[in-house]
Image (tube, rainbow, N blue to C red):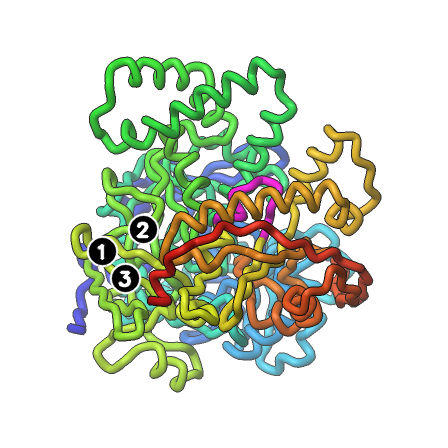
Amino acid sequence: MTKTLEGADGLTSIPALLHRNATKFADAPAYREKEFGIWQSWSWSQALEEIEALALGMIDLGVAEGDFVAVIGRNRPRLYWAMMSAQMCGAVPVPLYNDAAAEEMAYTLGHCGAKYVIAGDQEQVDKVMDIQGGLPQFEEMIYLDARGLRKYDHEKLRSYEQVQETGRAKRDDLIADMKARIAKLDYDSTAVMLYTSGTTGNPKGVVLSNRNVIETSRTSSEFDHLRQTDDILAYLPMAWVGDFIFSVGQALWTGYCTNCPESPETMMTDLREIGPTYYFAPPRVFETQLTNVMIRMEDASKLKKRMFDHFMAHARKVGPALLDGKPVGFMDRMKYKLGDLLVYGPLKNTLGFTRVRVGYTAGEAIGPEIFDFYRSLGINLKQLYGQTEATVYITAQPDGEVRSDTVGVVCPGVELKINDTGEVYYRSPGVFVEYYKNPESTADTKDAEGWVATGDAGFIEPDTGHLRIIDRAKDVGKMADGSLFAPKYVENKLKFYPNILEAVVFGNGRDECTAFINIDLTAVSNWAERNNIAYASYQELAGHPQVLAMIQSHVEETNRSVADDEMLSGCQVHRFVVLHKELDADDGELTRTRKVRRKKIEEKFHDIITAMYDGSDHISTVTEVTYEDGRKGAIKATLEIRTAAVEQVTTRMAAE
């Protein structure tokens, strides 16, 4: 690809965009944060002053050009500022997942060689202090929230405010140095290093340049007509590439306001108060919100429940067509308006989606039924397909071309191709520079011409140009009879049911498919309470005969739906187990972005999988678990293996 020295509109770095906004949008809100129940706001000019003060203090502390600065904590304006301050120093910010265990942080901090850490609170400080003995390069830690840290040894520990105060006091002495460092930044300078979720091994450090971030932010903002007056809610992990682009890249390019909730517990309340116009959530968030809606409707009066069901049936019929500007009959329009007054409008307000103009979901495939539910309400929810190595964007759905079974058309500047095995490849200005300290993996993923292997199997529709993703290429296989095996397709259908939190389907090379099911504790406990079912623990509830019967009905209904797809009809679930524990990132079964680690699950629960295929009715098992305080333990359980009814399919396309 051609190397250009000039950035978009002559802006070649993140600090350059920040300085432009502080001039162009000086008094416009740039950041908001809710603290102690009150929203605080900073304009772009105020944010620049805060960021420069921290950068000057970091230079005085010894941060050098090329140093790696780790940032750990929940979404807060000051931690976003910390990443930009690092860039002003010529250093490289490395955000980490704030829920990662100390051992996981040890790998990342050791791998990048971070000399400095900016931690949000005592929890993050403690984790770094626990592992600092194994980090010889570590020099200083800056903390934001001082609660609980008064009696700590402050030899290598400084407060965020203290560093800023030093920066302000020494501004005249240090400002020339800082400006010189900023002037050296160009389109090919590193903007950030983000670590992959590590579904198949240790996370890899993805190096993204200013070119990657700015070009992607520019084209994606233009694609969706994002505006300076937009609002987003920044609540997803700061270590995730999506949050970096939405809360830093696009925010800086357009000048819109980034709003940070008070805590994860208040996120839904804060979402309603802000009413974002631009919103992103992974499928899990939309699934959880839908589950909560369904629970509330089960508890509602018979009249409200009947009204909800009646108008939602109409919404599913005409809502998406109205949203896309397609012709809808007069009476249907009038009925939809009445439904909006009585049901859809109040529901959107409860969810915090009243003002959403552009909404996206990505990261994992979303169930078609869940996707269609939100669009039927009039919410402009779309799908995009991307990855860290692409600086998010590969394909996205344009307005008016939104479907549940595709992930859209190529984004501006992106090229796409499918190889002989069906794997999707792309190249674009957003293609990452390299995997840090990993030239072998870089070469395996990105070829000399800049084409990147996604690891996903899919195809491009010839008539529409839309990309359809089947599954992870490594997960797509064949059943013993030659029919196609694509587990994610079935898992997403199962997860449409509010009672099912997670599903993992097995069957590659086998005669039939089987599945693990995790119940959704919130939904199922609410159902149990309504049906006077007593239980003492998650394990007891998950194994209750009535719960198992309910889950079996969901599996069998899913089988009827899967049977309608001739290509994938062989993926019907014949036998299943409701697991005695939730799959958990702390136990290595999920990534920090909630993606299933199939290989780990197959290894850890091999005895249960074996029992599902050998005809057993029950299996006794012992499973290691990790408690919240990091201690290890084990839980014993005897699980019932259930057989589900399947639909007979006479034709198997893949087997012919």
The span shown in magenta is 493-502
Label annotation for residue 6: none
> Could you tell me the amino acid type at mark 1?
Glu
Q: Quadrant of residue 278?
A: top left
Q: Which amino acid is tagged 2?
A: Thr
Residue 461 shows which numbered tag?
1
Q: Is mark 3 on a helix, strand or loop?
A: strand
Q: Please name the residue shown 29% across and 45% down the image.
A: 254
Question: Residue 19: where, in percent of width, then height?
Answer: 31, 52
- Residue beneath label 2, please? 406
Does residue 62 appear to the left or right of 539 in the view shown? left
Residue matched to label 3: 459
The relative height of residue 323 versus residue 128 in the rendered view (above or below) is above
How far is mark 2 from mark 1, CA to CA? Answer: 9 Å
Looking at the image, can residue 504 be seen? yes
Gap in angstroms between the C-alphas marked 1 and 3: 6 Å
